[in-house]
Image (tube, helix red, strand yellow):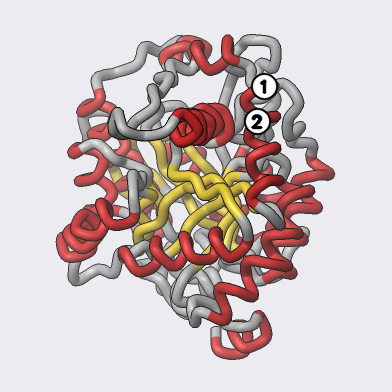
Amino acid sequence: MDTKGMTRDRNPGLFGGNRFKLGVFGINCSGGLSLLKERWHGSWGDNVNVAKLADEAGLECLVPLQRWKGYGGVSNVNSHCLDSIAWASGLLGQTRHLSIFATVHATLLHPVFAAKQMATADLIGGGRFGVNLVPGSNAAEFRMFGQELDEHLDRYAMAQEWWDVIRRAWSNEEEFDFEGRYFKLKGVISRPVPYAGMPPMMNAGASPVGRDFAVRNSDMHYDWCQSPEDSRERIKESKARALPRPLQVWSPISVVCRPTQTEVKDFLDDCVASADWEAVDRRNASRLAPRGSKSQSADSVAAIRRQEEARAVIARDHYSIFGTPDHVADELARLSEAGFDGVSIIFVNYLQELPYFVQEVIPRLEHRGLRSPIATVRLTS
């Protein structure tokens, strides 16, 4: 078995397939990415239903959060969080085409233990598993494990050793020793190995150190976006630095899509009114002041403020698209034109909003040549 690189037997549609790829982000946690008092509950049954819908609609992947405690406040958002490796294993058994990632804290889960868990998940899914590797950043969560949060540079150095151990454990036929700064291991062996080749690794490093790690190691760089045009040169540089290894660049985004702009405005107003601002403050999210020139009208300034406040509570400051199906499709086309290979989407309520997105936005993306009908993709994958 070739475990040294990606093969065509792995992750259908994720490598190849549609020009612009789509995923769903954060369904395994209560609240998802939103800090609202009435919100997504993240039950197992709802997760299964979203996964099956995404699978049938031809989306490429699901990416989970991994949280160990909530943000407090009235909502205590993310206090209920399904473990991402067990979650991925369960959903891989419920789907047929979808790639499903597990978000794994390298600093909290031993690599020899993780290698066996993740290979098992990949076998359950027949080569549809992926790793979203994170070094961690929440000091309160680390203290639950009796650890203090290391400096940023040190966390990525540890993550590098962790990933090196994983790759060797999956590719070596014989036992090996590992002598690093963080891991000193003797006689390492891990069986079973993944289904066919190496599962893809995603990393969301946005700092210079994190981005260097992602460019050096990952198959999918989960990068943040301020605007599509501002991201263009950064994406080109990341892909060039990764050569000769191909690198996809994705971004997490928030979508609110409604038939009319009035319905979008009303929904955003409701979100701001029902926000758990105590939880927002605990998350240390900055309140954004209205931007623009002094010549803007009061209505224009109010609209900007509504968008920014809604973005803070719905999407945790990720790039947001709020509008009609035509507007959402146009904005996704902008992201594709800038060089993004795909996006993973945040909804306030995934079961209520994903069906409308599938019905109205995906056909518009097909019309723009960014995606092909499901049957065509699956016949050529």
Q: Is residue 316 above or below residue 323?
A: above
Determine which quarter of the picture holds residue 23.
bottom right
Residue 219 x %, y %: 36, 60
Give me the residue at 70% from left, 25% from top.
Answer: 80
Q: Bin the neighbour count of mark 2 within 10 Å (Cα to Cα): few under 14, some 14-19, many 20 and up.
A: some
Disc sitting over residue 42 in the figure? none
- Is 278 on the left-hand or right-hand side of 215? right
Disc sitting over residue 269 in the figure? 2
- Is 244 on the left-hand or right-hand side of 223? left
Residue 61 x %, y %: 58, 59
Give me the residue at 20% from left, 46% from top.
Answer: 212
How many numbered circles does the render carry? 2
Type of amino acid at the residue the image marks with label 1 = Ala
Residue 224 x %, y %: 36, 44
The residue wearing badge 1 is 273
Give me the residue at 31% from left, 41% from top.
Answer: 205
Residue 364 x %, y %: 60, 74
Q: Observer-nearest residue: 8 or 249?
A: 249
For residue 115, say whether it is visible.
no
Badge 2 vs badge 1, beta-carbon distance below 8 Å: yes
Determine which quarter of the picture holds residue 264.
top right
Determine which quarter of the picture holds residue 266.
top right
- Say which quadrant the C terminus sits in: bottom right
Q: Secondary structure at mark 1?
A: helix
In the current view of this chain or complex, which residue is farthest to the right? 45
Q: Observer-nearest residue: 249 or 67?
A: 249
